[in-house]
Image: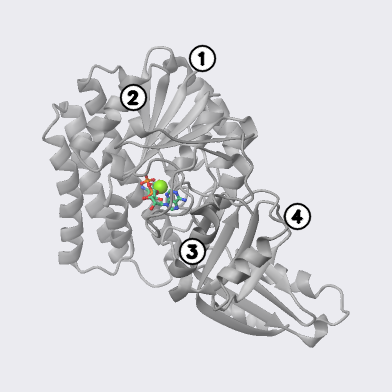
Amino acid sequence: MNHKIAKFGGTSLANFEAMSRCADIVLSSQSTRIVVVSASSGVTNLLVSLSTGSLSATQRNDAIAKISGIQSAIATHLELSSQQLSLIDDLLEKVGDIATSIARLNVGEEQVRTQLTDQLLACGEQLSSTLFTQVLIERGVNAHWLDVRDVMRTSSDFGKATVCIDTVAQLASERMTPLLEKQVIVTQGFIGCDTQGNTTTLGRGGSDYSAALLGEATHCSQIDIWTDVTGIFTTDPRITAQAYALEEISFNEAAEMATFGAKVLHPSTLIPAMRCNIPVFVGSSRAPESGGTIVRNETESKPVYRAIALRREQTLLTVTSMDMLHAPGFLARVFTILAKYNLSVDLVTTSEVSVAITLDNTGSNSGGNSQISQVMLDELEEVCQVTIEKDLALVALIGNAIDTSYGVGTRLFATLHDVNVRMICQGASSHNLCFLVEERQATDVISRLHHAMFEQNARGVA
Ligand code: ADP
Ligand code: ASP
Ligand code: MG
């Protein structure tokens, strides 16, 4: 069947009015047969605050009351069945119970905490999906609520689980595909389940990725990501009002954008879409008539500059050793230590006796910086000197043939003549040029680059 998937993000499901607009979108397209939802706006952040275990009992009750308030403001507009009502009550009770259990954990029980955290965070999507199913039913849609944990099989890496693609494909063909002919399946983004039946999550913002995975598993014709902006912009519209929505962007460019901080898409979203060549549409659930951006394999235009992404809170790790001089194997030793502590390297530059690297900080539940632990530093310091710099931001210029187009460097450095470019990576990909600047200068740097490269007559030309 030639079906589409619609994914609605948190702000799109923030209240009853917002959910009603999403229902309009589902109703407007007969081919939309799978709906993937995030938690209502604010709920996951409240659940994350409960998962820290550091709130007092009063603060915990406040957070739970806020979650319950967001959901009951929606529920009052609906005629929920007694089964749905008791599911919602059970979920809210579960939130309280898990939050209390986490608060009582002792130091050293990290493993239990991460496992409980995923159970806690999953309640957000379970609540919103229950409510949105009823919104659709009351609008005449033959909607079917599905617990995605029956399909989304993952590893047991709580907080950032890896998806078992083949198992998901098999489970989706058994448990989803037969329903698509007659029903609209409403299910949860972000969450999954390991082989022992434990709830897992895919990392913050992971609902986009869930939608793409389910799109791949059910062979859909398009994945529609409905959010709070009218598409993928030349840069985050919160940084500069001059940013504008792109009509089209290639998979490769959009994947670079997502990797380098454009929050509009979770970094892994395009992997399943690229594997199966499924176009992804990004649009605003508030203004669906405004159109949006289509992400696909081939684009009509291939501008040198397509967009600028920003990733804040970067840490630069510089390792130095005289052993590096003409000695093979030094880099391998450094990278082996980083891999041992599960740190994924992002940007790298090398000189004769030093290597500077930034670490990937995407996907963790807490957001923020990668965990550079003291034990890891101790181990690194056995082979080299280590310096750490914080308060940096990574700026990524995204486009086409950036590595071979004349004039890119001239434009970049002329625009940033008074900015300290702390590190620069260019040449590994034809789609990006990345550099680090001081965090406090980041928004100014983006605004200036945007002005020079995307405004007036520039519009993406080198
Ligand atoms: P949702 O809750 O729908 O998943 P997100 O908050 O995760 O929405 O993503 C949408 C936000 O992404 C926008 O409000 C915008 O501030 C941010 N964003 C960052 N970079 C871009 C970009 N290049 N284009 C559009 N939005 C962007
Ligand atoms: N609700 C989750 C989060 O806020 C997942 C998502 O919105 O994509 O991170
Ligand atoms: Mg998101």
Q: How many neighbours does mark 1 have within 10 angstroms: few (below 14), some (14-19), or many (20 or more)?
A: few
* SS assignment at label 1: loop
Residue 238 is situated, as x and y percent measured from the top left of the image, at 37, 57
Is label 3's Cβ within 8 Å of ligand 1?
A: no
Judged by depth in the image, the label closer to the viewer, 1 or 4, is 4
Residue 34 is situated, as x and y percent measured from the top left of the image, at 41, 26
Report the number of numbered marks.
Answer: 4
Q: How many neighbours does mark 4 have within 10 angstroms: few (below 14), some (14-19), or many (20 or more)?
A: few
* SS assignment at label 3: helix
Q: How far apart are marks 3 and 2 (CA)?
A: 36 Å
Q: Are marks 2 and 1 in contact (CB under 8 Å)?
A: no
Write down the residue under mark 2: 26
Write down the residue under mark 3: 446
Q: Distance between the residues labelled 1 and 4?
A: 43 Å
Chain-order first, disc 4 or disc 2: 2
Chain-order first, disc 3 or disc 2: 2
Which residue is drawn at the image coordinates 46% and 15% (left, top)? Answer: 178
Chain-order first, disc 1 or disc 3: 1
Q: Distance between the residues labelled 1 and 3?
A: 44 Å
Quarter of the image for the C terminus: give it: bottom right
Q: Which label sits on residue 404? A: 4
In the image, 393 versus 323, the foreground residue is 393
Write down the residue under mark 1: 1
Chain-order first, disc 4 or disc 3: 4
Is label 4's Cβ within 8 Å of ligand 1?
A: no
Residue 355 is situated, as x and y percent measured from the top left of the image, at 71, 76
In the image, 224: left or right of 16? right
Q: How many neighbours does mark 2 have within 10 angstroms: few (below 14), some (14-19), or many (20 or more)?
A: many
Q: Do the residues labelled 1 and 4 touch (CB within 8 Å)?
A: no
Q: Do the residues labelled 3 and 2 touch (CB within 8 Å)?
A: no
* SS assignment at label 4: loop
